[in-house]
Image (spheres, rainbow, N blue to C red):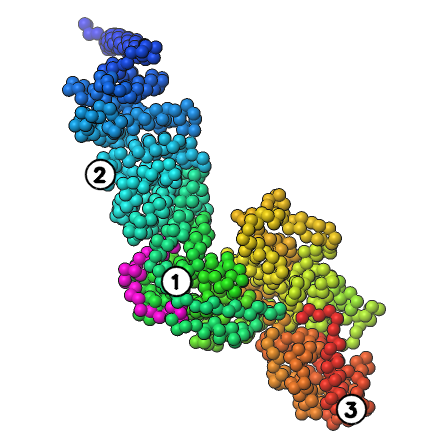
Amino acid sequence: MFSVPQSSKTEFLDKARQAREERKGQKEKERAAIHIQALVRRFLCRCRLQKQIRKEVDDYFQVSETGSSKRNALSIFKIARKLLFIYRQEDKMRFEKLCRAILASMEVENEPKVWYVSLALSKDLTIPWLKQIKDVLWTCCQLLKNLKPDILQDNKLVTLYLTMLVTFTDTSTWRIVRGKGEALRPALMRICENIMGHLNQKGFYSVLQILLTNGLARSKPSLSKGTLTAIFTLSLRPVIAAHFSDNLLRSFLIHIMSVPAVVSHLSVLTPEVKTHDLLRKFILFLSREEQCSDICVCLEGSHTLCLLGNLIHLGYLNEKVLEEEASHFVKDLTDMLSYCQRYVSQKKSNLTHWHPVLGWFSQTVDYGLNESMPLVTKQLQYLWGVSVIRTLFSDVLSKKLESQEPTPPPPQPSTSQNNLPVKSDFLKRAFQKSASVRNILKPVGGKRVDSAEVQKVCSICVLYQTALSTLTQIRLQILTGLTHLDDLLPKLWAFICELGPQGGLKLFMECLNNDTEESKQLLSMLMLFCDCSRHLITILDDIEVYEEQTSFKIEELITISSFLNTFVYKMIWDGILENAKGEKLELFHSVHGWLMVLYERDCRRRFTPDDHWLRKDLKPSLLFQELEKGKKRAQLLLQYIPHVIPHKNRVLLFRNIVTKEKESLGLVETSSASPHVTHITIRRSRMLEDGYDQLRRLPVNSIKGVIRVKFVNDLGVDEAGIDQDGVFKEFLEEIIKKVFNPALNLFKTTSGNERLYPSPTSYIHENHLQLFEFVGKMLGKAVYEGIVVDVPFASFFLSQVLGHHHSTFYSSIDELPSLDSEFYKNLTSIKRYDGDVGDLGLTLSYDEDVMGQLVCHELIPGGKTMPVTNENKISYIHLMAHFRMHTQIKEQTAAFIRGFRSIINPEWLHMFSTPEVQRLVSGDNAEIDLDDLKKHTVYYGGFHSSHRVIIWLWDILSSDFNAEERAMFLKFVTSCSRPPLLGFAYLKPPFSIRCVEVSDDQDTGDTLGSVLRGFFTIRKKEPGGRLPTSSTCFNLLKLPNYSKKSILRDKLRYAISMNTGFELS
């Protein structure tokens, strides 16, 4: 009956809990209010105190400024303690005044109580003073980090804070140590060391680095001489105080020596950069691999490059130290470059950044350094400057090459092709040298590869090779620097020749099969030699190579090319190239590049003996078998050094490739199928127009296939005769004859040797580019079918057809003589001009008379206002050559190449040099082989090989006619003065001689009667009044049955000499 309901109990408990929580909340509010009040009171108290202190500080400095009384050190100490206690950003002006007051106190004469530093000697104040000066100096450091030296006000503050740091980190300016106070110097020096130790721990070197970078990492430095000297002095003091300990040297290298071009600025301003034997200490510190690696990892690529530049510059300034520590110096630089090389990328990607010296780089790039990169590059250039090269390569350059008479220059190239055999007397003279010179220039061996001298030279070569592969954007500068000394490369070659027990090839082939460090270094030496020599020969013109024989003598080039040819051949044929990667692959491309530069130079103007490039131990039959089987080494050989295969074998291979393509396209007659035939009708009076209209729209495969031509006269009546390739041959020859006639102005002839190239003014024809493409197709068809045509091209134009102008080794100036030899001489005379080229009044433009109007072509945008100077004259020469041979005819050449390559696969022509492609087009330039012609002649109309007229004919050709007349005879009967490349067995249709009784217009072909009369030498009447005639479309000679040999000789000579008019040969 007394029980409380459950709901009332719950309500009671809830109310009690709520009351409790309210009391607790109230207490919390009270406590919070008290806490807030305390914080506010404390804040207000602090503000009042700060305000009071700031007022005291302001009053102190105001009284000092207005009054004449000197502030004693103790008062400065006290006011400084107060200012440091409340120091905030807003107190920068007060801190500036404090610093000025402290420095002013140090300048007072003979009043020790005024000197701020005197407090360090007070028993009670030494420790507080030391703490205070540390705080003051670190505050100076903090402020220095945010100052911009290029702003005038900030520059003044930089000077003030640096003066504070300079004053209190060394006792040299303290008046207290003068006179009787000298005994105090050691104790005070320890105080300075203590201060510097504290600053170092806080990040003193980082502050100096930021300050130096802000002031120097720009095109125009903003730090004054005094400021820069002060910073360098400050940076050296801790290092000297610590007796060049590893820790301090590390900090100095990371923070000071990695500032862009700091040594460049310092070397001008202060001699201190060369004191304390700094370079030697840096070199020896970095020679320990783990320390060098640590430095590089800390700095990363951009700053490692800056450190590298400063070290190189120091080496340039300290030649004696460089000479003594060359091996360590080379190792240090190689290690740093190798570190950077790991991050150098060949192409752009999401992970790479562009660096103005390293190219695409896979580490982060500090773009703030870009403005100072020209200065860093200038420092790096000392590495390949004459002074450093002479020091490092002293062992190689000290070698004496025997003095010798200058080698007579080789004969000038003839006006036909430049691949004519070298005169025997030139080669004889080239090799008539003393035995000692030949021994130096040819592999003789005798020097141990593990000797200190060889190891040193190898390590230097590794350094420069690493620089070439790392500093990708200044690679050409490095190569140019290394080739500046004329005697370095010949002496390096002589050094290479002396290596190993036998010298030369054998040693390097052994190195290829070894993976030892020694082998890699030897191969790097060869690689550097090849890269530099290739660059040198590429930039030398013909006069310098052949006549002046700069750097290399002609006989040296012959020896070197033989070595390179064998080395590349062995690398390919022995299977080394197939599995080559990394360094071995780079080596191959270096050696191959140098080899091909020499080969192409030789193709333009011969300097090697006959068959110099061929490999006698390579059997073409074996090579072709391996090509059929798809063997890799055979394919690589054909890709890289086809010149080791005899030319005729390569032509055979080319013809086989064409035949296979014809079979694959169904263009060859088989037992089961006939090829598609394209029929065209041509009016003789409009042969070019009709041919162009009907053939240009044909698909490429139809042009490659069988084309039958039907000629009609002006009345539209068909000419008699069925085309069995002969009429098409005549059509093709006539078309080519018309389009290459300079009178049409599609093509022009070069001055002097009259070789063809596209006319720059061909645009007078409305559809000139389509015409060029058509001409390219027609010439391609001729080459495709093996029809030789007398079209002598300028070699620079053929080089473009082959794509050689895209090669990194191609030089426009080398090809210029094939366009205009006079123009080439004029340009090279500018190159050799000793005076000021500016006096000649030239600009970077070319004035040309175009159809009576003077047109100015700018070689670069704005070129007509830019004068040619001694600095840009080399660029002017190359720009001018490039304009004349490329820019002017760029569109015409591109259209011609497009048409030609649609018929002839460019890869097929890679196995031929420029002169060899000319031979492919126009036939062999060798003497006509009459025995071969006689062997492959077909007789008609009663003639036979024993017929007296035929015997007379062959006798006249061999005995009475000279070489020129024999060429005219061949042109008379085949339309080309040169024999087919593979001999007359490949002349299509075969050469034939037919006995004729009547004139051409009455000739109806052979009959039984005419054949019998011809066979038995029965004449209807004496044919002495008639001349021999020919049908070039069938390679047919129509010969009357003459009664006397003398009549035949005179008539034949007259007939071939009448075949004049427009001739291209």
Q: Label 1 vs label 2: CA separation?
A: 44 Å
Say the numbered circle drawn on residue 243.
Answer: 2
Q: Label 1 vs label 3: CA separation?
A: 80 Å
Does residue 460 belong to the magenta stretch?
yes
Residue ID at (29%, 40%): 275
Say the numbered circle drawn on residue 1009.
Answer: 3
Q: Quadrant of residue 1050?
A: bottom right
Q: Nearer the viewer, residue 746 or 162?
A: 162
Circle nearer the viewer, 1 or 3 = 1
Element on which disc 2 rests: loop
N-terminal of the pair, mark 2 or mark 3, is 2
Q: Of the residues shown, which amino acid type is indicated by label 1?
A: Lys
Tell me the quadrant of the picture where the N terminus can be found. Answer: top left
Horizontal side, residue 567 vs residue 328: left or right = right
Q: Of the residues shown, which amino acid type is indicated by label 2?
A: His
Say the numbered circle drawn on residue 79.
Answer: none
Horizontal side, residue 535 vs residue 205: left or right = right
Element on which disc 1 rests: helix
* Magenta segment main secondary structure: helix
Residue ID at (45%, 51%): 477
Q: Nearer the viewer, residue 161 or 67?
A: 67
Residue ID at (16%, 28%): 183
Residues in magenta, as a range: 437-465
